Amino acid sequence: SRSAMDHQPKFFENLSGAGKAIAVLTSGGDAQGMNAAVRAVVRMGIYVNAKVYFIYEGYQGMVDGGDNIVEVSWESVSSILQVGGTVIGSARCKPFRTREGRLQAALNLVQRGITNLCVIGGDGSLTGANLFREEWSGLLEELAQKGKIDAEAVKKYAYLNIVGMVGSIDNDFCGTDMTIGTDSALHRIIEVVDAIMTTAQSHQRTFVLEVMGRHCGYLALVSALACGADWVFIPEYPPEEGWEDTMCVKLSENRARKKRLNIIIVAEGAIDCHNKPITSEKVKDLVVQRLGFDTRVTILGHVQRGGTPSAFDRILASRMGVEAVLALLEATPDTPACVVSLSGNQAVRLPLMECVQMTQEVQKAMDEGRFLEAVRLRGRSFENNLNTYKLLSHKKPDAELPKTNFNVAVLNVGAPAAGMNAAVRAAVRVGMTEGHKIFAVIDGFEGFARGKIREISWGDVGGWTGQGGSILGTKRTLPAKYLEKIAEQMRTNNINALMVIGGFEAYLGLLELSAAREKYDEFCVPMVMVPATVSNNVPGSDFSIGADTALNTITDTCDRIKQSASGTKRRVFIIETMGGYCGYLANMGALAAGADAAYIFEEQFDIRELQANVEHLTEKMKTSIQRGLVLRNENCNENYTTDFIYQLYSEEGKGVFDCRKNVLGHMQQGGAPSPFDRNFGTKISAKAMQWISKKLKETYRKGKVFANTDDSVCLLGMRRRNLVFQPVAELKNETDFVHRIPKEQWWLKLRPLMKILAKYKTSYDVSDSGQLEHVAMLPKEAETGAI
């Protein structure tokens, strides 16, 4: 419903901040990634010629004034991207809650000509900012009456614009899928759980873990989903009456099934259905008294708020920082104060007070015991997580399961990617719950042809979520040369549907199998593909399982390399990343690590570009930031190899900087999956299996399954805000088969952002942003890719 006017592209560089002053502050509890947001606001502000100020120590600094409010330069935010917490400090502020305090704060801002505020904090901080904005003109009039400012100033600074970004590890803010810091907090929790699992395994112990979240169970829920916990307690969904018995039965059943450890996760705000707290100690005592299990409690506490921000949080915060500056430049006296956030993979602006009201509604619903309502108000991502957890954690007794007599085979194809095992586990368990027999194929299509196929059960996939690589084994071999043998195996094992988890080869494999349907009836069955590859080069999906883990590996390594470069001074590192011809890892890695340049295949470059980069680094060495970081995708150019670029930089940089190179290699495919990949793998795979069940019912005729239409061979991918099933035949036109990449890739839109943050002048199309949306209560059907 956009008017014709909106079709003209809008460019960031055409917006001017000249004459405007923007101040940025962090308030409330700290969260990893706040610094990335501060950095983006400062650099974007300076880029459009606005003045940018830090306000130290949150609202306290705004009230105290003086050197708590300082103008900053480009270099002020150097090297803070990888630091957790907030470098400009945050404080609880009593004075700002009084009108006197706000009067003083207004004076401090007007004296410096600041009328644009970017507030990074939780709902309390944002509500305070909104009140300040509403009172602004009154405060200025009072200051004028007292003779502290002149009438001219009242006119000139008549309006205060406010944009909020939500920084809170709890992810308790309605209207945003992910708040800044949530992903990093999950990283901390998962690291701890993985470590605890090894010791619990050794001693057959039960561990009760208490995680943060006073009023919101997001961290508890998602970490339970990501580590396959036996039980989880969250404030939004208290257990039913008699939960003590149910839980103990469940734990002892698991022990009887040879499971050597139990993990129970408790949110600090967990309650029962009478609103009485359920504490971790209470849970421990219960297990010890009833079952006599050796039980330990671990309270994670502030560890969760610490440490370096994850790649996801750095990119999220950088994107939001840009969006915040845009929103401030475009704000008018009539636009409501807004929050910038992500919905799925899309940056959005929402009215601040609508989000706050909705967030308070959740609390009210919980206080009044309307728990189903509370879960619904939390939003679709939360609800999805809860439903998936319930589906996967409790095995129903065999007698209660439906029997469909369908056999579904699951296989991994392509290179290993972290999160594949989580996807297999979800497929097996959802498939069994739906009443199918699930068969696991070892070693991809090649193993399939050789008959390496066996039935797999619920218990077989226990503990798989945290395992990296591919337990089933995976090969790049395509099915075309084994069609005869694969058809024979499908016949022998009576396979009625296929689920393929893998990368570009999996996509090619499905195209080959569907082409072979004319010749072989065996392939006339529903087939679905779940994208899993570190390269993130599968058409039809914004993300693929494994890419987030690889991105974190790249980011961590770059952090270490930057540290080493800072130590030696005047050193530039050239780092080669994986990805085939797809520049996703190089580009996003550069954004997350704060690199100076990233060479990718999708954006052709020549010797002039290389020269410009060398000159840019030479200039940089004259400032206080004496190090450089350049990422290069492995296939970005066949002649400008990593060695060539290294030698060129070494020669051209003589006397100014020296150069080192580093090829990251296969470490990008390994490692324990990140929380995002575990969660994404689990949810997307569960959804794919539900699709298989639906298709099996639709195509079952006269005692056999027969599916030969295009819509029975699909790829399930995340597109902007939704998870969608797309026939692979329709994706052909979107694919560059020579270079194995999609013809259009969403992340290329973020490329100019990386360049601007590295101080290059560039053109940045921001036509997508700027429409203020409303916080919607979503209809039940709206499924989303929100992870």
Image: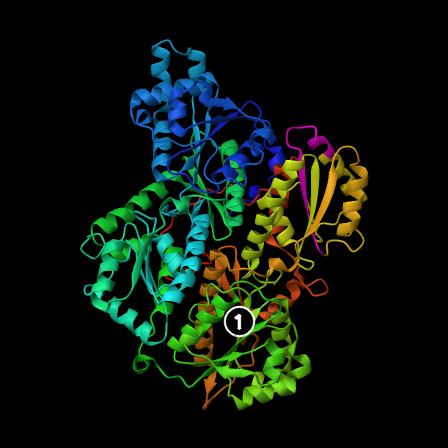
Residue 190 image position (x, y, % from top left): 43, 56
Is 432 situated left or right of 441 in this image? left
Residue situated in front as seen by the camera: 420 or 376: 420
Give residue 141's quadrant in the image: top left
Identify the residue at image location x=43%, y=63%: 198
Q: Which residue is mark 1?
A: 471
Residue farthest front in this picture: 203
Identify the residue at image location x=76%, y=53%: 637
Query: Label 1 amino acid?
Result: Ile
Is 403 situated left or right of 625 in this image? left
Is 616 situated above or below 288? above
Is 36 situated above or below 434? above
Is 137 situated above or below 430? above
Identify the residue at image location x=73%, y=64%: 738
Residue situated in front as seen by the camera: 390 or 229: 229
One can see residue 609 in this view: yes
Is 161 situated left or right of 475 in this image? left
Please provide the residue range marked out in magenta. Answer: 618-634
Residue 732 image position (x, y, % from top left): 65, 67
